[in-house]
Image (cartoon, helix red, strand yellow):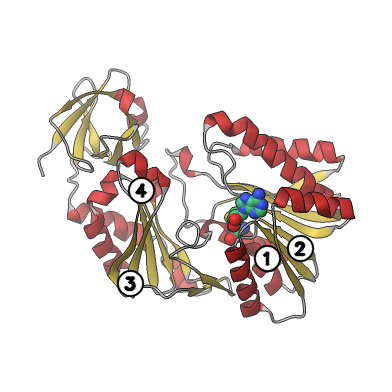
Amino acid sequence: MCMTDLILHPKRDFSVLRRHPWIFSGAVAKVDGTPAQGDSVRVLSSDGTVLGYGAYSPTSQIRVRMWTFDPSAVVDEGFVADRIGRAVGARAVFLAEGATNAFRLVNAEADGVPGLVADRYGEWIVCQFTAAGTERWKREIVAALQCFSPCRGVYERSDVDVREHEGLPPVTGVLAGEPPPERIEIVENGCRYLVDVREGHKTGFYLDQRDNRNLVKRYANGCDVLNAFSYTGGFGIAAVAAAAASVTHVDLSAPSLELAKTNTGLNTCHVEESSFIQGNVFEVLRKFRDEGRSFDLVILDPPKFAESKGSLMKAARGYKDINLLGIKLLRPGGLLATFSCSGLMTPALFHKVVADAAVDAKRDIQVTTRLQQAEDHPEGLCFPEGLYLKGLLCRAW
Ligand code: SAH
């Protein structure tokens, strides 16, 4: 592959020197040559200092994603394999502990592989390629995943909108080995879940909430639990495993609730009452409030409300509404586990939004634990965008 130099504008090397992996198109002064989509380019500051190597995305605002900040590195098959190997190696603890067989093997930028998510579900690996660079090295990445994390098959779920920015079409299908079954059964901290890796959200399951589901499990015994935005059961199943008194799941999606029902059946070992309500959480919670219903534990795990900076304030109002309703349904001493997975919503803003809801609800609320995405979804220290999931476990008096 012939190497192209990409030179930055004066004073636009600051973020690269701070080891931030994204170079926006406005920072690029000159490209010496015509690199193809996903080709590696050598990145130089305006004074000619070599800053490292990155993958070129000609159609994206994020023109380059840095592979390395080492001027003497060579981005080749061995380099890519090494990145996969070190990411997979860092997850060895999950296999060793044995309580969980579904976890993220590679978390994109934080693992030095911008544009690649690889999740392990039992004996299968499910990947998402979201940038030109990883698309270019797909074959090598799949081979490295199979080598470092032997599996029965590798399945692709690159059916995400962000690929459009990269000029890449959506694709799904088997990349290697056997096709996955319709549902893969996974174990997470002793709870069993069926995962639909072909049609499910993300790569099939919200692995990022694992630790938070486990935390909820500690408190759920004997509780009446409201699992709002339940998806396939997630937090509610963890509550079932902890012998909650009752679990009420609410979600818009009928197929997700169907799977939540099946997952409940897989885990029920105590007499508890589970109900599955298909509806809009905003409306269902309002109805519960009007009916005077109450719960000991309320989980609010909505989808991303803020997609752009422009929609952040509207999203904040949505988060406040939902938290206000959730708080009103809590019995005195009850717990609220509330989340935002909008990257644009900072932990500080989220904290303020929940506090505003507490003020309106006229309740005294303490934060017992600040929450975030699980440890297999690390955040690059120089890439704050990688921290997207935040939450609070609160007690309301
Ligand atoms: N807590 C879950 C993941 C939640 S994902 C887990 O641990 O697995 C968010 C869910 O919210 C999706 O299943 C989506 O169908 C649902 N959803 C989105 N908007 C909704 C709304 N207004 N009312 C009810 N459910 C909604």
Left/right placement of residue 354 relative to residue 97 reads right
Q: Earlier in the sequence, mark 1 or mark 4?
A: 4
Tell me the kind of residue under disc 4. Answer: Thr
Cα separation, mark 2 vs mark 4, equals 36 Å
**Disc assigned to residue 236:** 1
Q: Vertically, is 170 above or below 31?
A: below
Q: Which residue is mark 4?
A: 130
Question: Which of the 4 image quadrants contains residue 165?
Answer: top left
Q: Which residue is mark 2?
A: 225
Q: Classify mark 4: residues with Cα within 10 Å, few (<14), some (14-19) or many (20+).
A: many
Left/right placement of residue 298 relative to residue 49 reads right
Q: Is residue 395 visible?
A: no
Q: Earlier in the sequence, mark 2 or mark 4?
A: 4
> Disc 4 vs disc 3: Cβ atoms closer than 8 Å?
no
Q: Classify mark 1: residues with Cα within 10 Å, few (<14), some (14-19) or many (20+).
A: many
Secondary-structure class at tag 4: loop
Q: Classify mark 2: residues with Cα within 10 Å, few (<14), some (14-19) or many (20+).
A: many
Cα separation, mark 2 vs mark 1, equals 7 Å
Tell me the kind of residue under disc 2. Answer: Val
Q: How far from the left and from the top, in percent, is residue 153?
A: 33, 72
Which image quarter holds the N terminus? top left
Q: How far from the left and from the top, in percent, is residue 386?
A: 47, 43
Q: For ligand 1, which image quadrant applies?
A: bottom right
Q: Earlier in the sequence, mark 3 or mark 1?
A: 3
Secondary-structure class at tag 2: strand
Q: Classify mark 3: residues with Cα within 10 Å, few (<14), some (14-19) or many (20+).
A: some
Cα separation, mark 3 vs mark 2, equals 37 Å
Q: Which residue is mark 3?
A: 153
